[in-house]
Amino acid sequence: MEERLQKILARCGIASRRGAEDMILEGRVTVNGQIAVLGTKADFDEDHIKVDGKLIRKTESKVYIMLNKPEKYITAVKDPEGRPTVMELLKRVKISVFPVGRLDYNSEGLLIMTNDGDLANALLHPKNKIPKTYLVKIDGFLQDKDILSFKKGIKLEDGRTAPAKVRKVREMSANSWIEITIHEGKKRQIRRMLEQLRHSVLKLKRIRVSGLELGSLPSGAFRYLTHDEVEKLKKETTT
């Protein structure tokens, strides 16, 4: 049965549907020797579908991993500029996985890695409004009017953000730590929101995705999610 190519790639654990669309746009996917375009449909059982020249196969088992991404790593399977990617931190994982969403090169913290394209798509889909919480070190101190701006939404060049939750964590002599929770996925969103309020981000770490906590996992380390954690994530994306 024919279906959209990005859906096939997601089901086979190649990437999330959004990530698969990027692969197609980059010309990395072929169907029967022809470079695919967005909108291409294929039959997994009848057509030869390749990514980067390799024939894709059905994934036998699903893998779910939490990685504590360090700074100076790209959240991607490959980087054309040759910078280190998060895949280099998962060399002991024998089944291919991909990152769910992105963390900036200079950001760190909780990153889910999986080969479950359906769950990845559900976690990223705007309709599910999955909350993501960040611990952020900024120059200066948030004022009450800044917190109100977060609650109302901040106007960026690509539109106004949805309301965000913010709380002060600790203040020091020249800078402070705050906690921000958002459910959108705009590029560099937290950094741009704070820039609009004239605060520079000195450090940014994602500590929570929905109910999944980073905890004490060391920087650069990973662990497999428990069955209960996976089931909870699935439940939160279907309610």
Image (cartoon, grey):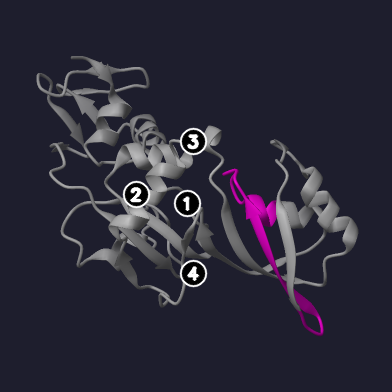
Residue 198 locus on image (x, y percent): 82, 60
> How busy is the neighbourhood of tag 1: few (under 14 within 10 Å), some, or many (20 plus)?
some
Q: Which residue is mark 4?
A: 71
CA–CA distance in space, label 3 to label 1: 14 Å
- Which mark's residue is nearer the viewer, 3 or 2? 2
Above or below residue 170? Residue 187 is above
Q: Amino acid at mark 3?
A: His
* SS of the residue under disc 2: helix
173 part of magenta stretch? yes
Q: Are marks 3 and 2 in contact (CB under 8 Å)?
A: no
Image quadrant containing the N terminus: top left
The tag earlier along the polypeptide, 2 or 1, is: 1
CA–CA distance in space, label 4 to label 1: 13 Å
User: What's the mark number on residue 125?
Assistant: 3
Residue 150 locus on image (x, y percent): 77, 51
Residue 195 locus on image (x, y percent): 76, 56
Residue 58 locus on image (x, y percent): 14, 37
Above or below residue 57? Residue 137 is below
User: What's the mark number on residue 231?
Assistant: 2
Q: Which residue is mark 1?
A: 102
Q: Amino acid at mark 1?
A: Arg
Q: Residue at x 13, y 21 (%)?
A: 47
